[in-house]
């Protein structure tokens, strides 16, 4: 199978690069510099020329706060570019796996969100990602939409790397403790998506929505404490409420995802976020 990974140099794309070395498929990794998914003609030409069978879309506008001021750009990447992918997939009988986010929910209840729960994004980022989801789920292509949460890796700009940097620079940090979710190691997500690829017969000619994150829950404070413990950093961490750390975009206070559908359908075991975190040191 020939597989195109968009956003191939992002933190998730780079994890696919690692695991693709042992895979039986042929992977093509592209980012905006060599394939702009906002340009449908570019996507169509590449798909036809490379005989692509599957697109894994890791490309996204993820600047949550900037999106409040850059609404058009967020929707261009997270909705309009997704429409391009859907149309190209439809025209060429190509399947699509698209990565989405827990930010499609408002976080106003305290049980893990199921795929069937009503969405209600709090900001532009979540709105634009939900718009992309809807384009896929309302299409006629073979596709998976996989929502994830609190994604991190040792590459790229993310909370994990920011905390490691600040932990070296400062003696103490204030971190919010009233936003609850599940940190997700990008390598674990990439491996789970590859399982979906291997079991593509399960979703051929369907459009399915799944949730995937590492097991367990944490606040940003809990996650920071665990990072510092794992890397033996002496920086002191103080828990604070979100109101003491205002951001331009409102975040869901609770965005834990229920993964039971994914675990059942793909017969897949997911490790705890703390075990995944510890593996980043290996």
Image (spheres, rainbow, N blue to C red):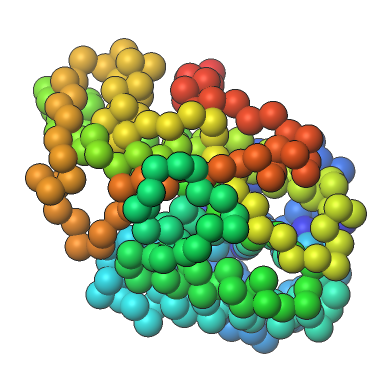
- Name the residue located 35 percent from the left edge and 71 percent from the top edge: 124
Residue at far bottom of view? 41
Q: Quadrant of residue 144?
A: bottom right
Counting from the top left corner in percent of width and height, residue 240 is at: 14, 35
- Name the residue located 54 percent from the left edge and 25 percent from the top edge: 272
Counting from the top left corner in percent of width and height, residue 142 is at: 79, 67
Counting from the top left corner in percent of width and height, residue 280 is at: 49, 25
Counting from the top left corner in percent of width and height, residue 151 is at: 47, 44
- Could you tell me if residue 106 is visible in this image? yes
- Location of the N terminus by quadrant is bottom right
257, 49: nearer the viewer? 257
Q: Is residue 16 left or right of residue 237?
A: right
Q: Quadrant of residue 161?
A: top left
Q: Quadrant of residue 87?
A: bottom right
Q: Is residue 129 above or below residue 179?
A: below
Q: Is residue 99 above or below residue 151?
A: below
- Name the residue located 54 percent from the left edge and 63 percent from the top edge: 59
């Amino acid at each position: 199978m020939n597989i195109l990974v968009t956003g191939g140099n992002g933190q998730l794309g780079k994890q696919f690069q690692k695991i693709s070395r042992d895979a039986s498929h042929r992977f093509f990794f592209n980012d905006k510099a060599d394939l702009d998914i906002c340009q449908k003609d570019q996507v169509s030409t590449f798909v036809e020329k490379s005989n692509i069978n599957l697109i894994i879309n890791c490309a996204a506008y993820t600047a949550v706060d900037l999106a409040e001021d850059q609404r058009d750009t967020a929707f261009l990447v997270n909705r309009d570019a997704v429409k391009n992918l859907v149309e190209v997939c439809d025209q060429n009988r190509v399947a699509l796996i698209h990565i989405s986010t827990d930010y499609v929910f408002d976080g106003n209840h305290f049980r893990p969100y199921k795929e069937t729960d009503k969405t209600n994004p709090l900001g532009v980022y979540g709105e634009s990602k939900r718009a992309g989801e809807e384009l896929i789920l309302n299409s006629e292509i073979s596709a998976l939409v996989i929502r994830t949460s609190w994604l991190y890796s040792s590459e790229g700009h993310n909370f994990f790397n920011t905390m490691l940097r600040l932990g070296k620079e400062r003696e103490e940090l204030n971190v919010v403790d009233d936003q609850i979710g599940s940190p997700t190691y990008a390598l674990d997500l990439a491996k789970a998506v590859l399982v979906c690829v291997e079991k593509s017969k399960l979703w051929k000619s369907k459009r399915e929505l799944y949730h995937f994150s590492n097991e367990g829950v944490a606040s940003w404070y809990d996650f920071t404490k665990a990072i510092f413990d794992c890397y033996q950093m002496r920086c002191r961490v103080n828990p604070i409420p979100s109101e003491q750390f205002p951001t331009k975009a409102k975040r869901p206070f609770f965005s834990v995802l229920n993964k039971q559908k994914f675990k059942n359908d793909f017969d897949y075991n997911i490790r705890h976020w703390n075990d995944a975190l510890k593996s980043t040191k290996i």
